[in-house]
Image: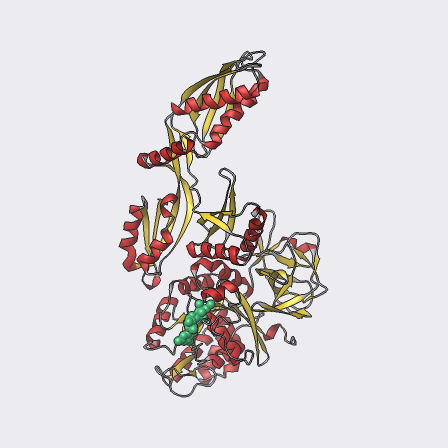
Amino acid sequence: MSGYTTKDIRNVVLLGHAGSGKTTLVESLLHAAGAAQSPGSVEKGNTLSDDDALERKHCHSLRSSLISVDRNGCHINLIDTPGYPDFVGHALGALPAVETAALVVNAQTGIQTMTRRFEQWTSEHKQCRIIVINHIDAEGVNLEGLLAQIRETFGDECMAINLPAENATKVVDCFFTPSGEADFWLVDDAHTAVIDQTVEVDERLMEQYLEHGKLEPRALHDAFEKALREGHLVPVCFVSAKMGTGIPELLEVFGKLLPNPAEGNRPLFVREAEDAAEPVAIKPEADGDILCHVFKVMHDPYVGKLGVFRIHHGTVTKNSELHIDDNPKPFKVGHLFKMHGGKHEEIDEGVPGDLCAVAKVGDIHFGSVLHNRAKDSRLRLQLPEVPLPLAGLAVKPRKRGDEQKLAEALEKLTEEDPGLTVERDPDINEMILRGQGDLHLRTALERMEEVYNVAVDSKPPTIPYRETITKKSEGHHRHKKQSGGAGQFGEVYLRIEPLKRGMGFEFVTKVVGGVIPNQFIPSVEKGVREVYQRGAVAGYPMQDVRVTVYDGKYHSVDSNEVSFISAGRKAFQDAIDKAKPIVMEPMVNIEVTVPHDNMGDITGDLSSRRGRVSNTNVQSGGFVTIEGQAPLAELEDYQSKLNSISGGEGSYTMQFSHYDPMPANLRKDLISRFEKKEE
Ligand SMILES: Nc1nc2c(ncn2[C@@H]2O[C@H](COP(=O)(O)OP(=O)(O)O)[C@@H](O)[C@H]2O)c(=O)[nH]1
Ligand SMILES: [Mg+2]
């Protein structure tokens, strides 16, 4: 199958809101290129990219999927991605592996939130872009209006290079050989507009153009690539993935106009150095050292863990020995694969620019750099930032003894998805799975049960409240027991005082004259720390307290460690009771983006959640961003509320800010719940 070289490769990631038709488009492209017998359908669950059992069950993509099409000597690698914001990690992860992002817009629904976000990300990351307007066959769509809206939202660089014709049952070319009549606009005008835009990036070409008034499309190639790289031109194409309209034309555009790996913007590699990281430009040359990066990890039931990578430099063969990041011990590639949805095919070699995979390499993870010389051990690729996962679920195995199985399943899940993390909270002995939102977490649970066969119990994670004191006080306890044999005796006097936020715990000894012998001081501290970690009023860890032990008494026969642990614990508790203890709650900074019309509802809802708004910013396309702060405890169901207010158009991010004292009435609730539990 091979036989192609770097210049024949096109790498394209399909991005767009869920339902825009990306998965259907892949099927349709494969069919038009003669690869698939008949195109699969998302509803029937027989597409190549939605190959996973859960994707078929839910009829939408949950992970990125790599498929290639060979056509007219071009090898096109397509990465299909999920469009739901919850699975954005999979989509963002694929960006550094490709030259071009194809933004798929559903003509029926217009530009939607995720498409807007993807457009922002890809233009920020200097990715060549193309816009594919899909669903042009649907009833009552206004394609002319949509094109105008796209230009208004994403800029006038978005220019049609073909146009719908004969009531959107055909498309006519406006670039290579403009002729025929379109449903709207004049083909010649569209042609001139694209040529004018293209020559603007090349002065010499511009002069030729002005002189002759005409240029061959072939003469335009280099300028066209430059315009794509600079974001000076974003071609727009029309298709119906379902009917096949515009699909052969789109394949032609991919092959003839999109950049090959040598023509795209260079990936952002940096060499880590002592003081600052220096950028390194990598040209895709076949000879010389090997440099790759892993953009996807997947667990296949037959071959195990697969690391899918992009070759940036050199040629990878079965005999290549590659290091992972700064690991001094290389692994041997052994078997090299091309992925085709869930299937893989063994190949002999991978050329620069191509996307390949290796199996059974334990240490490979998302973002790993693979290379063949120690000198490159400090090379890193700058990865797109995936939003910090804040939605959480505390998980534990339903069956005792499944702990190991659960840990393994969680590891696989987080390896596959850069938007998912696992935290262990030792304070409360909880395992917390964090993701982008409710759907994300539910899907992860489902995958654990159905794919990894671990039954899991889950509940909202305990909010990490903290306790502290607000004034100085003193505490005392005399521990004395006389029951039969040896007695127990220990007496402790201590002072406590609040410390500044973030100072933590301090334990000071000011005992004079050995009234508490040195050997028992650690026992006193142990007792104090027990209370500090477990909490004194509501059952949450304390913070920012200094404890000074200054007096006490011991007994030469009856005193022992246990006595002083107990005396320390109770003296500290006694002091806390007199020090006006409070409960503190985590506050987060929240940023909500919604259509302008929803602004009032969002700010109203935030203040009903004890939040406050600090700023609002108008965004393009009729959106606003509202910034503010709110208690984490009030935001548990925020995603679903936001969805219902904004009809699914809204999105939000949040980040931990600081701890604030809880209002007295809410604190009382927490405390009484704790007291009931203690009884
Ligand atoms: N009418 C029409 N429906 C389409 C077209 N492309 C996709 N669909 C349908 O739109 C839905 C979403 O398609 P899918 O490929 O899963 O979208 P994705 O979420 O972007 O991958 C499915 O029901 C498809 O059958 C199209 O060009 N025309
Ligand atoms: Mg899909």
x, y percentage for residue 117?
Answer: 42, 61
Write the residue at 38% across / 79% down. 137
x, y percentage for residue 128?
Answer: 49, 68
Foreground of the two, 395 or 70: 395
Foreground of the two, 80 or 118: 80
Foreground of the two, 291 or 105: 105
Image quarter in which the N terminus is found:
bottom right
How many numbered marks have been drawn onto this rendered protein structure? 0
Side (left or right) of 573 relative to 144: right
In this rendering, is residue 654 above or below 214? above
Write the residue at 51% across / 25% down. 527
Q: Quadrant of residue 34?
A: bottom right
Res 286 visible: yes
Res 21 visible: no
x, y percentage for residue 431?
Answer: 51, 45
Foreground of the two, 346 or 270: 346
In this rendering, is residue 31 above or below 514? below
Side (left or right) of 312 relative to 539: right
